[in-house]
Amino acid sequence: MLDKHLIAKTAPEANKKNVILWKNYRVTVLGERLFRLERSERKKFRDGATLSVWFRNMPPQSFTATENEGALEVKTAGATLLIRENRGDCGIVLRGETEEKPICNDGNLLGTYRTLDECDGDLYIRTGKKIRPDYGVCSKTGIAVYDDSGSETLNRNGEIEKEYADGTDEYIFAYGKDYRGAVKALYMICGTVPLVPRFALGNWWSRYFEYTDEEYLTLLNRFKERGIPLSVATVDMDWHYSVHLDEQKKITESGKNTEFYGGASGWTGYSWNKDLFPDYKKFLRLVKAEGLKITLNLHPADGVRWFEDMYAEMAEAVGADAASGEQIKFDIFDPKFANAYFSVLHKPYEKDGVDFWWIDWQQGKAAGKLGIDPLWALNHYHYLDNAKNFREPLILSRYAGVGSHRYPLGFSGDTVITWRTLKYLPYFTATASNIGYGWWSHDIGGHMQGEHNGELFLRHAQFGVFSPINRYHSTSAPTLTKEPWFYKNGTGALLEEQMKLRHKLLPFLYTCAYKANKNAEMLIEPTYYYHPDCKEAYEYGNEYYFGGALLVAPVVTPEEKDGFARVKAWLPAGRWTDIFTGDVYEISNANGEEKTLLRTLESIPVLAKSGTILPLSEAKGNGTPNPGTLTVKIFDGNGEYEMYEDARAENRDGEFFTKFIARETTTESGETIQSLCITSSGDGGVIPSGRKIRLQFVNAEKGNIALKIGGKEAAAEKIYADCVTLCIDFKPGETYEIAVTHRRESKFDAWKKRAEKILTGCDGTNAVIITANRKLQELKNENEAALFFVYRSKLPEVVVERLMETF
């Protein structure tokens, strides 16, 4: 029997009050818009958990079930399900509609896919075929179907049984355009996504390379000297004997390169390579002393062989004859093997300093006594085992089907280093939200082949900052690495800035992780989650919302000869401010507007909607601590934001919430008052004492500041900067009220100010630029501006294009 901690808690049997039997069907009402539909000619239905679905024991639901004209009509407040003898004739009517729709996946917005291994974008390079993500639970028709018929059974002892549905076993999601509602329903039956550890959201260093301990520690020191923060150190498969295994262990020479002994492949290993790490415990201690978490790579397919340090102990645990030297075959489905696999092979290394494991399963979809895909079992048991000793469990592994969101993080595999790959990743990552899989980790910069191109890597790194996990990785070629300092002509410096920015975003990122756990709000979501009635939201697949507040449109094509890359983006109605350039886009069309956004190498379009509140950490160095100093950017408008912090990293309880409420009003004299109220609750011991918060009112260049603390007027520590900025000494439980009064410029006056900055920084003939700037001051309206700059200014075409971008 499996060890207790490897047995997941499930509640698979449905409440009988929610079940209807009719002909060869069993219908279970799981929610007013969620139904389970089983069909079995033998009327044999399963009540046990599957690998995907664990929870069906819902409270009694409100519904009616009546038979009418040879059909079963199941009606809830959210939908009417119509069951007919022929499954293909079944239908459903959504709330507020009259049309009966078929129960199928027409219009499905798709979910995600097992791996992008050996993919150039969405193209598998071995076959030339395109990958197609599996179905998700969101659909343009409002109806999505998850077919669980082929999912194995997870029994009460936590073991996997090769038992399937006797017929069909489907879940019908009738959520219309409430896409997040559909994902919440998926979590309700499968289990929610865990709160991802804060450390996972920083910068990861990873490389498939034969580092010695001294080389790895020297590398970490190079990052430290440059002030580039890291949070996770990955050691790929060369931590154990691998590439030179045969010669190091004299396998062939001793006549043991046979099936009986397990061969000489170096992919699988559990003994530290003492040629590279003569004192691995010291190495782990030194890495931990740098403030980093540690993960090691695993390829477990070859089991445990005679040369491993723990072979004898493993043989005793599974009842094998250690004296024979016979390979102990990998079989994660065998409870005896699974228990020993963790207790003998992994737990000792966790005591030595390993925090979690990177399960790099690439050896097919059939293994062990059951002859089925072991990937799900590896993810499931590894995550449960990691949770035994760690308050913040984590794994890194490939996607194993519906329900895999329970085991973050996802490793997308070995991609080709091309623009095509970069172009596909934003769509692939956002679309995965449709199956609740919000924590993909890509090889930032790509893994192999392709081209060594500084611009491509930089654009990939910029996407990495605004992706779920920022893990730099590459294959083993000596010249293929991701250290920023190897990239010249300013690219390396920009790469360093991206890594620093990622750690600045940690307060925002960790709050997003909390929201994912509590509210099913993914860090990255497609734009149609927020604008389901706008057709354009479905057409711009590379664009996505980041944390619900930032609209990100990554640069996925090279810059043109004029030095600018171009991104075609759709901007929804409202006021948007680019957090890097300061460009403001005011979109009045209710259906939004297409814009071509021009960007140099320094940034990609990241637009904050009106009312956004963006917290940034000012902490330096490795690790991901709750910061002593915060910068909070406030973008004019009405908005609310609650920042989450906790003490889980210190292995103790304690949560702390800081709430920001922004309101914008206009006085009779036409002045704008941007107010901000800051309150907090929870365990103040979670945050560093003496915290300072620097408040930046991004859209107010100048203005008067009024500050109240605890309802009493106080002097504001004004900071001279590009926008109204002040600093407060923050105390938990105190209330801070700030009001910034400023006169917002007209759209045209703001454009003129922006235009002068563009002219100041552009390339061209000085006489032409000076004349254009002089004329700019005389212009009275947009029509005059367009006429002059487009037809008469003689400025380079790209400068004109940039000037007209925010019109």
Image (spheres, grey):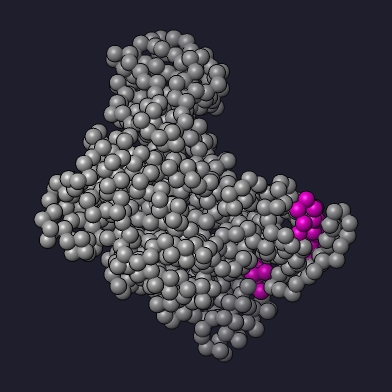
Tell me the quadrant of the picture where the C terminus can be found. bottom right
Q: Is residue 406 above or below residue 689?
A: above
Tell me the quadrant of the picture where the N terminus can be found. top left
Residue 749 on the magenta span = yes
Residue 671 shows in the view: no
Residue 6 coordinates in the image, percent (x, y): 41, 36
Extreme right residue here? 712
Magenta residues? 730-753
Q: Is residue 727 above or below residue 295?
A: below
- The one nearer the camera, 782 or 578, is 578
Which quadrant of the structure image shows residue 635? bottom right
Report the residue at 64% width, 70% height from top: 751
Which quadrant of the structure image shows residue 119? bottom left
Report the residue at 75% width, 72% height from top: 719
Q: Count every numbered label the image shows and give the total.
A: 0
Report the residue at 38% width, 49% height from top: 346
Residue 67 shows in the view: yes
Q: Is residue 642 above or below residue 281?
A: above
- The one nearer the camera, 136 or 482, is 482
Residue 454 coordinates in the image, percent (x, y): 39, 74
Residue 265 coordinates in the image, percent (x, y): 20, 56
Residue 670 coordinates in the image, percent (x, y): 80, 61
